[in-house]
Amino acid sequence: MQFDDRRLPGQHQPPVRLAGLSDVDGVVTLLGDVAEARTNQEMVALALVEYGRLDVAVLNAGAGGAPPLEDEGAIAALDAIHAVNVRGAALGIRAAAPALRAAGGGAVVVTASVAALRGDPYTWAYNTTKAAAVNLVRSAALDYAYQGIRINAIAPGLTLTARTAAVHEDAERAGELTRRIPLGRWAEPHEQAEVIWFLASPAASYITGEVLVSDGGLSASNGVFLPPSADPPAGAQSFQPTTPPRPVPPIVPSSSRRI
C-alpha cells in the first residue's frame, strides 16, 4: 500500500492514519511520497520481503485542488498535482516492473478518473493530469505487453470517500451532481475496488492498455440533457428544435466569384 504525504500550498489535510491497518492480516504499510523514486522502490522491496514476489501493483494515490489558472500559485499547484498523478504513477510502474517481470508477469492498475475523459469547470489541473495518466497507461501497456505485464486504468466517477464527504454532505450541490448520474447515486468504495480487482485478476488476462470507466453512466452523456429519472409520459415526443434551420447559401460557380 502506498500513501502520499504531499500537501498543496494552503490546503489543509487530515493526518494520514496507518496504525489501524497494521492489525489487518497480510497488510504492511509504508508512509512516503509517491512522487519520489525512493518511496516506490521501498514499497516494492517491502512487498518482496513480506510476500516473496509481486504479482500486482495498484497505483491509487491522487491529488487535486488547483486555483484558477491565472491566480498566483496556480502553476505551483499544477506541478504538485502532476507530481502525484503522473510522476507518481510513472515511478510506480518503473519500480514494479522488474519484480513483476521476475514473477513471470503481472498487472498494474492505475487509478485515473472520469475527469480524464472530458473537461470540467474549475478543475483544469486535475483533469489535465488525469488525462496524462491515461495516456501513460496506454503507452506503457504497449511497452510492457511482450514481457507479460498488463497495465490498465480505472476511471471512477463520483465515489463516497473521505475526500468527497464535504461535497456529498452539501445537499444542494450533491443533488445537482447526482442528478447527472443515470444510475442516480454515487459509487460505494467497494464497487470501485471490484473493478480494480477484476483488472488485476486472471479474469482480465487479455486486457491491457484499457481504461475501464466506472461512473454510473455519467460519461455516456454529452451533457446537453439530464438523464431521465422516470418513464416518459404517454405520447411524449423526442426533443425537436423549435428554431427553424438556417438556409444554406447558394453555391456560386467559381467562374462568377468575385474576390
Image (cartoon, helix red, strand yellow):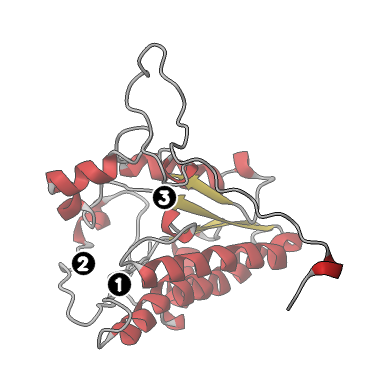
Label drawn at residue 162 = none
How dense is the environment of label 3, judged by Cα within 10 Å: few (below 14), some, or many (20 and up)? Answer: many
Total numbered labels placed on residues in the image: 3
Residue marked by disc 1: 31
- The answer to whether any part of residue 94 appears in the image is yes
Q: Position of residue 179 (x, y in %)?
A: 29, 38
3 or 2: mark nearer the eye: 3
Whether 231 is drawn above or below 114: the answer is above
Whether 84 is drawn above or below 76: the answer is above
User: 177 or 12: which is nearer to us?
Assistant: 177
Amino acid identity at mark 2: Val
- The answer to whether any part of residue 34 appears in the image is no
How dense is the environment of label 2, judged by Cα within 10 Å: few (below 14), some, or many (20 and up)? Answer: few
Q: Is residue 33 left or right of residue 146?
A: left
Numbered disc 1: secondary structure: loop
Residue marked by disc 3: 156
Numbered disc 2: secondary structure: loop
Amino acid identity at mark 1: Leu
Q: Are marks 1 and 2 in contact (CB under 8 Å)?
A: yes
**Which badge, 3 or 2, is on the more N-terminal residue?**
2
Numbered disc 3: secondary structure: strand
Label 3 and label 1: CA atoms lie apart by 24 Å
Residue marked by disc 2: 16
Amino acid identity at mark 3: Pro
3 or 1: mark nearer the eye: 3
**Which badge, 1 or 2, is on the more N-terminal residue?**
2
Q: Position of residue 185 (x, y in %)?
A: 29, 36
